[in-house]
Image (cartoon, helix red, strand yellow):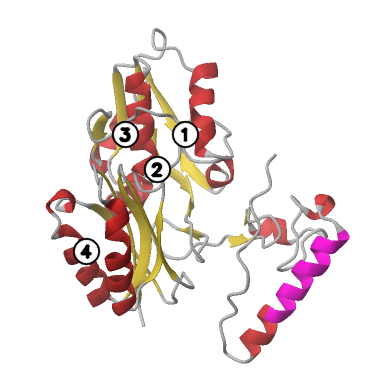
Amino acid sequence: MTVVVAALYKFVSLPDYRRLRQPLLERCRALDLSGTLLLAGEGINGTVAGSRAAIDALLDYLRRDPRLADLEHKESLDQCMPFYRMKVKLKNEIVTMGVEGIDPAQTAGTYVAPRDWNRLISAGDVLVIDTRNDYEVAVGTFEGACNPRTTSFREFPAFVAANLDRRRHKKVAMFCTGGIRCEKSTAYLKQQGFDQVYHLRGGILRYLQEVPQAESLWRGECFVFDNRVSVDHNLDKGSFELCHGCRYPLAEADKDSKKYLPGVACPRCYDSQTEQQRARFSERQRQVQLAKSRNQVHIGAPPPARQQR
């Protein structure tokens, strides 16, 4: 069965977000969807997967709320379910920057459609910033984009303080996977006094969907937060895998290393693992292989946190 993967978000005031959780979770489970949705006072965010009919039914359910009538969403396809469970979580922010007083629903940068993005980022007077984390940028990014080298979106304000000057950087264009992080980062820059701030509408996923590969300025693949790990320019499952020791994406070259142990370690984390960790990860991998031999899915415990540099 072909699985539809839908990434969605909207910044909008939802003062009753706590009350929305249980009905939304029950609706998703009734539709046999898997994935994660986040609810906060500032809106909704998440990615879910299921049948074509189930995704359409969920979007219709959400858009019946007038506040979510123009909910943003992007789609891609997979041949397997990329999530194990369905979760609806309550959060302080739908994308965590940790700065109070930012309201993208009221103040954000200027949207740029995918078809106009190439022209904007090719201009010599525009600073182009990838607002994603370092491990995501390593999988792929736009030609000439600045990598802030963050390990968390919480670090973005510090990057701005150390590297950006509104008197020197007159035009700033930002992008992210689905549009939510760059929308919040443009609101933050506007708050800091930057005037001409732009962001890619629909994010990288919408760009890959709408811009022909022959015209594309995207280089590499796009990291996604599900079991596919990455998608290519056609939004098909990419070539990267995830290290289950440190949760970083692995290219084929990484798997050629002597420090690559499938399901256990990679060149990045091999030397920092303790014997106890390696034994635990090895046992987990053994259970995964046993489940696979029985044609079962091994869910297991939540994965470890990504190691910081």
- Residue type at mark 4? Leu
Q: Nearer the viewer, residue 16 or 37?
A: 16
State the separation of the CA atoms marked 1 and 4.
Answer: 29 Å
Q: Say left or right for 70 vs 15.
A: left
| Residue designated by label 4 | 59
Looking at marks 1 and 2 on the same chain, the residue that comes earlier in the sequence is marked by 2
The quadrant of the picture occupied by the C terminus is top right
**Neighbourhood count class around disc 1 (C-alpha, 10 Å): few under 14, some 14–19, many 20 upward:** some
Dots 1, 2 in contact, CB < 8 A? yes
Marks 3 and 4, how far apart at CA: 24 Å
Locate the N terminus and report the quarter of the image it occupies: bottom left
Which residues fall within the magenta stretch? 275-287
Q: At x 66% / y 60%, what residue is drawn?
A: 243
Between discs 4 and 2, the one toward the N terminus: 4
Residue 82 locus on image (x, y percent):
46, 70
Query: What's the residue at 51%, 18% (across, down)?
Result: 161
The residue that disc 2 covers is 93
Q: Are marks 1 and 4 in contact (CB under 8 Å)?
A: no
